Amino acid sequence: MTDRPPFCWDRVTDEQEATRLLSFARPLRLAPKSCLWHAGDNPDLLVRVEQGLLRAKVVLADGREYVKEFYWEGDEFLDFHHLLSGEPARYSVEALEPCRLQLFQLADLRQLSCWSAWYQHLLAVQLRIKEEKELLLLTESPQARYQHFLQCFPALDARVPDHQIAAYLGITPISLSRIRKRLKSLNQG
């Protein structure tokens, strides 16, 4: 996989239904470090990223942070765990850059005739992303994980702070620094 599978509205709705769908959109701008939702909230919404970069983060009791996912232009996401279980969110979503978002209340979307197809498409896209990351974390070395990150998401390397890339890859910032030095010396030699 060289990038995320695209989400395409035209696969699940016609022009008339898309117009109705957009009537439910609520625009939101988020400043960097602002949270869209916190762990413990009940985020009953679907989010479309028009501009900017966000991260889904898990913070453990001892303060360690892990990055579950990054979201950027064109991404659509929701908290599937909350939607399926009714339990509060287990992670926060925070802006890393100034963001322009469209928010859709799930109750509104369920009224649309295209919701079932749209939801099925969202699940398929998320499943592909999660399967790829799970296999990467289970089977690849830290260096291979970073190389995969660079190959699949080259623009994110410059947009995301090093400690957050490390948290996404399940390694320490020191390990990431060593991997970068090793790769740099391999490319020069």
Image: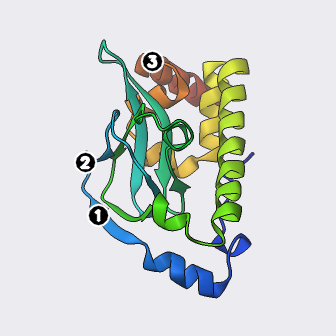
**Residue 27 quadrant:** bottom left
Q: Amino acid at mark 1?
A: Arg
* Residue 39 location (% of width, % of height): 35, 33
Q: Is residue 188 visible?
A: no
Q: Is residue 138 visible?
A: yes
Q: Nearer the viewer, mark 1 or mark 3?
A: 1
Structural distance between the alpha carbons of marks 3 and 2? 24 Å
* Residues packed near mark 2 inside 10 Å, few (<14), some (14 to 19) or many (20 plus): some
Apparent side of residue 104 relative to residue 84 in the rendered image (left or right): left
Q: Which residue position is annotated with label 3?
A: 172
Q: Which residue position is annotated with label 2?
A: 34
Disc nearer the start of the sequence (1/3): 1
In the image, which disc is placed on residue 29?
A: 1
* Residues packed near mark 3 inside 10 Å, few (<14), some (14 to 19) or many (20 plus): some
Of residues 20 and 62, which is closer to you in this image? 20
Structural distance between the alpha carbons of marks 1 and 3? 31 Å
Of residues 28 and 88, which is closer to you in this image? 88
Disc nearer the start of the sequence (2/1): 1
Apparent side of residue 95 relative to residue 188 in the rendered image (left or right): left
* Residue 2 location (% of width, % of height): 72, 48
Quadrant occupied by the N terminus = top right
Q: Nearer the viewer, mark 3 or mark 2?
A: 2
Of residues 27 and 107, which is closer to you in this image? 107
The image shows a total of numbered marks equal to: 3
Structural distance between the alpha carbons of marks 2 and 1? 10 Å
Is disc 3 in contact with disc 2, using a CB cutoff of under 8 Å? Answer: no
